[in-house]
C-alpha cells in the first residue's frame, strides 16, 4: 500500500461558508488514497465541531473574544514551539487553510515562520462591499507573496494571474454543501420567490425588493432569508427571516420555493448556488463570471442581461412562467482536493 502524506487542516472561523467548506474538504481527504488528515485544528465554538472525527480534532481556542484566547496568543507569540507541539506539527508539516480568518491568520504566520508549509484556499480576489473581512490589502498581500493558491473559480484565477504571473494555481470548484434535513417545521408561504444567505450590500437584495415591488405579482410572495441589515417598506407580500438560519431551514426554504434569486452586483461565486443546482431548482442569476461558471450547462438557470431592474424583472418573470426541466442525466466532472494539492508541486505523485 502506498504511503499517504499527512495534512493538517486549520480553520479558526466559527460558522458559515468557511466552516462548511472546511467540513467538505475533510470529508474528501478522509477517503483519499494520497493524503490523510493528521489533525483538524478548529475553535471549540465552530458550528460544525461535533460533526468531525473527534480523534482528529484539536480545539486551539474556545472562541474569538475570550480571555483564554488572548492569553494563548501571547503564549504562542513568545513560545512558537508550544504551538507546534499542541497542533502535533513539525517544521516540515503541511497545513491546508480552507479560508482566511482573523485568528487563523495570526496562527498561520507563526507556523510559516517555524517552517510549516502553508497551502491556502483563496475565496475572493477583493473584499466585497459591506463586508469587513478579509480586507483587500491582505488579499493582495497573499496573492503577491504566494507561490501557489487554490481558488474556487477561473475568473478569480485570471485576476490573480494578472497580479502575479509566476504563481501556480489550482481550481477547486465550490463544493455542493450536504445540508442536514430535520423534522422541524418552518412556517413558509405556499408560493414564493426566495433570496437566501447573508444579507450584504454586494448581493443586490435592495434591487430584488425593488424589482418585486414593481412586478405586482399578487400570487407570489418574496422571502428574504438570512442574517444582516435589511431596509424595506412594509409589504404584506414580503417576508423577512432576518437571522442566522439552521441547515434544515435552508433545505426547506430552497426546496419549497418557486425560484431562488441571486441578484448579486458583485461576487466570485455563491456557496448556495451549487446546492440549488443539485436540487434542480429554478435559479435567477446576474451575469457575473463566477456565477456563470457555477451554472454552466444547467437547464433551469435564468440569467439577467445586465444588472438593471428591467433585466432582473424579465428574468424573474421568465423563470416563473417556465416549466422546471428534468435534471441532466450526465455525471458532472468533479475536481477533488487531492488533485488540487498535487498541483502545488510540493508533493511527488506516486
Image (tube, grey):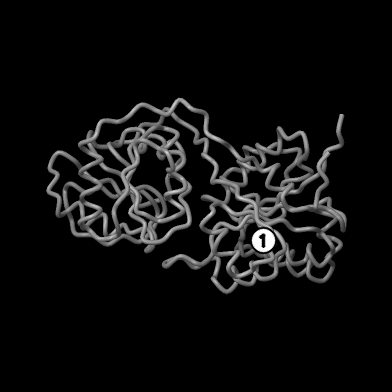
For label 1, the SS is helix
**Between 139 and 342, the one nearer to me in the picture:** 342
Which residue lies under the disc numbered 1? 104
Number of numbered markers: 1
Where is 39 relative to 86, above or below? above
Residue 301 horizontal/vertical position (percent): 35, 41
Q: In which quarter of the image is the N terminus?
A: top right
Q: In this view, does 216 lie to the left or right of 110?
A: left
Considering depth in this image, is 243 or 20 the residue closer to the camera? 20
Residue 123 percent across, percent down from the top left: 56, 57
Image quadrant in which you'd find residue 106: bottom right
**Residue 312: percent from left, percent from top:** 25, 53
Camera-side residue: 235 or 151? 151
Q: Is residue 93 left or right of residue 165?
A: right
Looking at the image, the residue that sits furthest to the bottom is 137
Q: Which of 254 and 79 is in front in this view?
A: 254
- From this view, report whether residue 7 is shown above or below residue 146: above
Q: Is residue 11 above or below residue 132?
A: above
Whether residue 336 sits left or right of residue 134 in the image: it is right
Residue under the point 33% across and 59% down: 204
List x then y, in percent, for residue 12: 64, 56
Residue lying at 16% horizontally and 54% vertically, measured from the top left: 213
Q: In which quarter of the image is the C terminus?
A: top right
Amino acid at each position: 500500500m502506498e504511503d499517504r502524506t499527512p495534512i493538517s487542516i486549520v480553520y479558526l472561523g466559527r460558522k458559515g461558508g468557511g466552516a462548511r467548506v472546511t467540513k467538505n474538504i475533510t470529508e474528501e481527504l478522509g477517503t483519499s488514497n494520497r493524503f490523510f488528515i493528521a489533525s483538524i485544528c478548529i475553535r471549540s465554538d465552530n458550528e460544525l465541531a461535533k460533526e468531525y472525527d473527534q480523534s482528529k480534532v484539536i480545539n486551539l481556542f474556545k472562541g474569538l473574544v475570550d480571555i483564554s484566547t488572548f492569553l494563548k496568543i501571547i503564549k504562542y507569540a513568545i513560545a512558537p514551539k508550544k504551538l507546534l507541539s499542541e497542533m502535533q506539527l513539525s517544521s516540515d508539516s503541511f497545513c491546508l487553510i480552507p479560508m482566511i480568518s482573523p485568528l487563523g491568520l495570526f496562527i498561520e504566520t507563526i507556523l510559516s515562520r517555524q517552517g510549516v508549509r502553508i497551502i491556502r484556499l483563496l475565496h475572493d480576489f477583493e473584499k466585497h462591499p459591506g463586508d469587513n473581512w478579509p480586507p483587500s490589502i491582505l488579499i493582495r498581500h497573499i496573492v503577491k507573496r504566494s507561490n501557489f493558491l487554490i481558488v474556487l473559480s477561473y475568473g478569480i484565477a485570471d485576476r490573480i494571474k494578472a497580479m502575479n504571473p509566476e504563481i501556480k494555481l489550482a481550481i477547486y470548484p465550490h463544493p455542493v454543501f450536504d445540508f442536514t434535513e430535520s423534522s422541524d417545521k418552518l412556517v413558509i408561504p405556499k408560493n414564493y420567490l426566495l433570496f437566501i444567505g447573508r444579507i450584504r450590500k454586494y448581493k443586490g437584495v435592495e434591487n430584488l425588493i425593488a424589482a418585486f415591488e414593481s412586478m405586482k405579482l399578487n400570487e407570489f410572495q418574496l422571502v428574504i432569508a438570512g442574517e444582516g441589515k435589511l431596509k424595506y417598506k412594509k409589504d404584506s407580500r414580503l417576508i423577512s427571516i432576518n437571522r442566522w438560519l439552521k441547515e434544515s431551514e435552508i433545505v426547506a426554504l430552497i426546496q419549497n420555493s418557486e425560484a431562488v434569486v441571486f441578484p448579486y452586483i458583485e461576487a466570485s461565486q455563491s456557496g448556495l448556488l451549487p446546492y440549488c443546482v443539485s436540487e434542480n431548482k429554478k435559479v435567477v442569476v446576474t451575469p457575473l463570471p463566477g456565477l456563470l461558471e457555477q451554472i454552466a450547462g444547467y437547464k433551469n438557470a435564468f440569467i439577467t442581461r445586465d444588472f438593471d431592474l428591467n433585466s432582473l424583472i424579465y428574468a424573474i418573470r421568465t423563470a416563473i412562467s417556465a416549466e422546471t426541466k428534468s435534471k441532466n442525466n450526465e455525471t458532472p466532472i468533479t475536481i477533488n482536493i487531492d488533485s488540487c494539492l498535487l498541483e502545488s508541486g510540493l508533493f511527488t505523485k506516486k
